[in-house]
Image: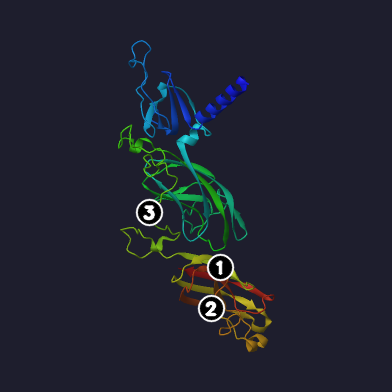
Amino acid sequence: MRKIILALLITIMAATFAAADTLYLRDGRTVRGTVLGFTSGRFAVRLTAAVTPPTTMQTGTQSANTSRIVGEIGDIVFIRAREIERVEIEGRSLDDARYLTRTVQVELGANWIDTGIDLRRGERVQVNATGTIVAGRARITPGGLRTTDPNAPLPRAAEGVLIGAVGNDPNSPIIEIGLSREFMADRDGRLYLTANRSSYTDARGAFSAQIRREIDLGQRAGNRRNNDNNSDINDDSDDLFGTGDTSSNPAPVRRRDNRDNQYPNPNDTGRRTPREVTISVPGNSRGTDAGIDLRSGDNVTITATGSVTAGRRAGVVSPDGGRATGFGSIAGTYPVPSIGVGALIGYIRLPNGQISQPFAVGSQQSFTAPAEGRLFLLINDDNYGDNSGNFEVRIVY
């Protein structure tokens, strides 16, 4: 019976001691607390039990060969690796104590994704990403597609590849991350992530990005004494070592298109270089994707050349269309009844999937985008089965 009771007591004591990380010092003492991390060859430990100076059996004084580590509950102490016999990390690996990890869902939208993580210049960050974004018929992984997108933030990188940036300055370097990458922050700032693609209104799904950064214990340790008798072990309001997972400070929005960025280049005259896209619109098109995501208020100029055959009723027509004949001209069943059959017209597909009222384009048209969305061009007809030919369309926006 006594053996059973003794075994239970030993088990209870072991469970009690295992409630914290434990460091066994070479001088025979035991340090219990929470290992905050490892920096410059030293462990940083927030104590959950007091540590007293070691004494010798003969003199009762501290030995010259022993560690000087002392502290009360709640103190943060730094212990050199050479002073430690072994370390037991409760329920974690040493890397768990050394690194902070956060997972962020990276959707493809008008804005970059704010990770909530503020980086310091020189800080090393590791990002590992999984998941799939579906855009149109393409399934995009964080490694990107085999194609490139000339209007993406990184035009020469793979379309859709996971990219990042530190800070909201439009001139800050963009980092190609892909499936996995470790990099060093070149400046102080918030970390933003997105997929390297100019178009986003047809996208759904998200990447899952795991961000791992090393806890910088040396950055602020010099601003505080090694021991502080007033420390509260349960008080997280003073996060000395920046161990908080995310910043509570609001960050400015980083837009995919920086035309209205809050931090413009001081050398910028305010006039951006117009973007230009050239596409072909087939005569049987019920909606050709222009590959352009417009914002409300954008100025757009479209010019078109070529000819299409708009069925036997209208024959060969220019982008301005031909004379409307037959039932369609009487009943007004063409998408834009006010313009000729076979003419070039357009609409905007809104972010919610609905489409705007079709509008006339013709051989040349300048307009202000009435809403945010994806631009589509098509032929003004009610029967596309017998159409042929193409319009060559140039879009400047």
Q: Report crowding for label 2: few under 14, some 14 to 19, many 20 or more residues within 10 A (C-alpha).
A: some
Labels 1 and 2: the sequence-earlier one: 1
Residue at the spot of label 1: 352
Q: Give the camera-side residue of 79 and 316.
A: 79
- Marks 3 and 1, how far apart in space? 32 Å
Labels 2 and 3: the sequence-earlier one: 3
Kind of residue indicated by mark 2 = Phe
Q: Give the camera-side residue of 190 and 318.
A: 190
Residue 10 lies, in percent from the top left, at: 55, 24
| C-beta proximity under 8 Å, tags 1 and 2 | no
Tell which residue pokes out farthest to the front in this image. 1
- Marks 1 and 2, how far apart in space? 19 Å
Q: Report crowding for label 3: few under 14, some 14 to 19, many 20 or more residues within 10 A (C-alpha).
A: few
Residue 36 lies, in percent from the top left, at: 43, 35
Tell which residue pokes out farthest to the bottom in this image. 330
Decide if residue 120 is on the left or right side of residue 176: left
Q: Nearer the viewer, mark 1 or mark 2?
A: 1
Residue 260 lies, in percent from the top left, at: 39, 63
Which image quadrant for residue 46? Answer: top left
Residue at the spot of label 2: 359
Kind of residue indicated by mark 3 = Asn
Residue at the spot of label 3: 171
Determine whether the residue tagged by mark 2 lies in a helix, strand or loop: strand
- Quadrant, the N terminus: top right
- Marks 2 and 3, how far apart in space? 37 Å
Determine whether the residue tagged by mark 3 lies in a helix, strand or loop: loop
Q: Number of labelled discs?
A: 3
Mark seen at residue 113: none
| C-beta proximity under 8 Å, tags 2 and 3 | no
Q: How is the image coloured?
A: rainbow
Q: Nearer the viewer, mark 3 or mark 1?
A: 1
